[in-house]
Amino acid sequence: MHTLCARGTMKPEISAAVTFLSRFLRVKGHVNDRQVQTFNQSLQDILSEQYQHHWFPDRPCKGSGYRCIRINHKMDPLVGQAGQRIGLTIQQLYSLLPSELTLWVDPFEVSYRIGEDGSICVLYESSPCPVGMPAMSSAMSPSGNGSGGPMVDSHSSCKEEMMVMGRTSPSKSYNMMTVSS
């Protein structure tokens, strides 16, 4: 899919992250379509507000930890807040979402890892470019296939930088993984 660079926008990244999480609610079948739509919109609004002053397209890794969505022994509070808006308890969210999930929402890239030692998989990636210039981006479609042009690998991701600095668990491979609904 071709997109125009909008240097300050975070909509495509947030949309990719929220769509990914929403699919888990759909798959289990305990949440109706209206609830999924409400969850989706609520989480987009929550993340947009939360990331507003923590989004740096010129330095994508700055604020990466702040924008990381984490579900493990503790539910991410932003996901929990969106779930509560549709009447789900934290325990119900735990039953619908992976028990060990890390989701990075960074300028130009959204990626995730399921399990502490799982591979890091890219959901969305685009290339930074001057304002008004076309950019290639790729997002995973619901079928798990890229919905557009090739993945762009022209910049070092925050996860790669953290791995070089030794701040994550042992070596992770960057294999593509499809998610089907």
Image: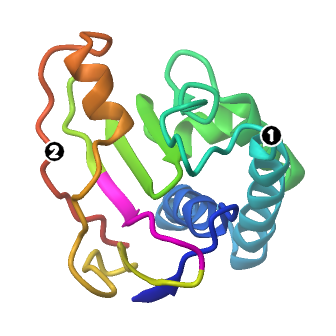
Residue at the spot x=19%, y=58% of the render?
A: 177
Q: Position of residue 64 (x, y in %)?
A: 54, 32
The one of 81 and 126 positioned closer to us in this rendering: 126
Of the residues under marks 1 and 2, which one precedes in the sequence? 1
State the image coordinates of residue 92 (x, y, percent, origin top left): 66, 40
Q: Secondary structure at mark 1?
A: loop
Tell me what residue is drawn at x 31 percent, y 81 percent.
143
The quadrant in which the N terminus is found is: bottom left
Other residues around mark 1 within 10 Å, as few (<14) / some (14–19) / many (≥20)? few
Viewer-nearest residue: 60 or 104: 60
Badge 1 amino acid: His
Residue in the image at 47% along x and 40% along y: 103
Mark-to-mark CA distance, 1 and 2 = 29 Å
Q: Is residue 123 above or below residue 117?
A: below
* Res. 97 visible in picture: no
Whether residue 7 is situated above or below residue 55 in the rendered picture = below
Q: Quadrant of residue 181?
A: bottom left
Q: Secondary structure at mark 2?
A: loop
The residue pinned by badge 2 equals 174
- Amino acid type at image mark 2: Tyr
Left or right of 72 in this view: 175: left
Proximity of marks 1 and 2: CB atoms separated by less than 8 Å: no
Q: Is residue 169 magenta?
A: no
Disc 1: which residue: 53
Q: Residue at the front extreme? A: 130
Q: Which residues fall within the magenta stretch?
A: 122-131
- Tell me the number on the disc at residue 141: none
Dot in front, 1 or 2: 1
Residue 124 drawn in magenta = yes
